[in-house]
Amino acid sequence: MRIGMPLNYSGGFKETVDDLATYEKAGLDIVYVPEAYSFDAVSQMGFIAAKTERLEIASGILQIYTRTPSLTAMTAAGMDFVSDGRFTLGIGASGPQVIEGFHGVPYHAPLGRTREIVDICRQVWRREKVQHSGKHYNIPLPDDQGTGLGKPLKLINHPVRERIPIMIAAIGPKNVELVSEIAEAWEPIFFLPEKAGDVWGEPLAKGKAKRDPALPALDVVAQAPLAIGEGLEDLVDFVRPMIALYVGGMGAKGKNFYNNLAQRYGYEAEAEKIQDLYLDGKKDEAAAEVPRDLLEKMSLIGPAGHVKERLAAMKEAGVTTLNVTPFASSAEERASLIEQVKTLASEV
């Protein structure tokens, strides 16, 4: 398993990047840069590329609605160039709160748009004259929709790679099936290895049956908080507010993807209670209702033997990249955790 780490987008970015060289030496394989409604991810990833040598860099994620497909492809090609071929394009649909609430564009047809965007990106990277006639994107723009002066163009530059890896964030059955069919990597959220097969096994198999044999095996990127040592079990409680935010606050009743996932994991009553409390403004009470069992099973927290058991469960469930958040107060301690988990992962 590769070991990755997400970067915090809420502050202290330059200081975090200054520590990446330390994590790189400790064996960190890849860093994921999110893009919510903070600073854009692209400028930050370029900064990371200039500060590192071996570390792979991924957008985790760029949402699909506000950049044109061709611009997304150009951005990925540019990032791959400045990083000397170390870039993975992570994309996803995000949610209507961000897309409509912050960007002011309609949130619709995430599956259809994703498929078309992937096709257009790969045309751009192959330096083909981009031509696409789809339900959501038409390139060049048809004469009756513009000036009539558009013509097929190809990327001026020669990309470092004509096939930049694409990672897609997805948790719904249809979305996961699409990822399994067309992408190099899949990023689910709140990965629970004991339930992964029940929740995602069928859509993964359906997508794989249609997968291009030229594509590599699907890289499964799972997130997990990390702390190794005795007496640390209660650190899982630090994850409660984030789970409550997603399960309770990311959407409305009947329109929350993460709440649906918690229910599919078997926490139907708990998910409903968390959402009711959160939407009533009772965030602390909502966090207290997050099941301890869920927190423990999606975490890598505890003695080395326990962490190794959880790593084995992750591997058995198909995880190939672990995106860990080390719980530590200094760069040196975080680097030590990266070294330890990398060693433990190599033993399972």
Image (spheres, rainbow, N blue to C red):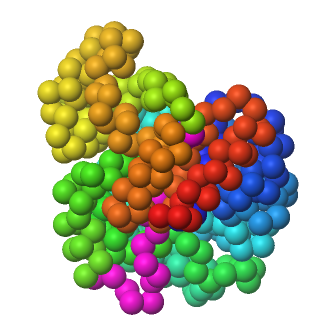
Residue 107 percent across, percent down from the top left = 35, 45
**Residue under the point 27% across and 68% down:** 204
Pick the front one: 138 or 344: 344
Rendered view: 289 above or below 318? above
Is residue 311 visible in the rendered image? The answer is yes
Residue 291 percent across, percent down from the top left = 28, 28
Magenta span covers which residues? 210-228
On the rendered structure, is 24 left or right of 90? right
Picture quadrant where residue 257 is located: top left
**Residue under the point 47% across and 52% down:** 308
Pick the front one: 178 or 12: 12
**Residue under the point 54% across and 60% down:** 345
Picture quadrant where residue 30 is located: bottom right
Rendered view: 273 above or below 59? above
Q: Is residue 211 magenta?
A: yes
On the rendered structure, is 319 left or right of 49? left
Is residue 148 visible in the rendered image? The answer is no
Residue 105 percent across, percent down from the top left = 43, 43
Pick the front one: 347 or 125: 347
Rendered view: 8 above or below 218? above
Residue 110 percent across, percent down from the top left = 34, 56
Q: Is residue 277 magenta?
A: no
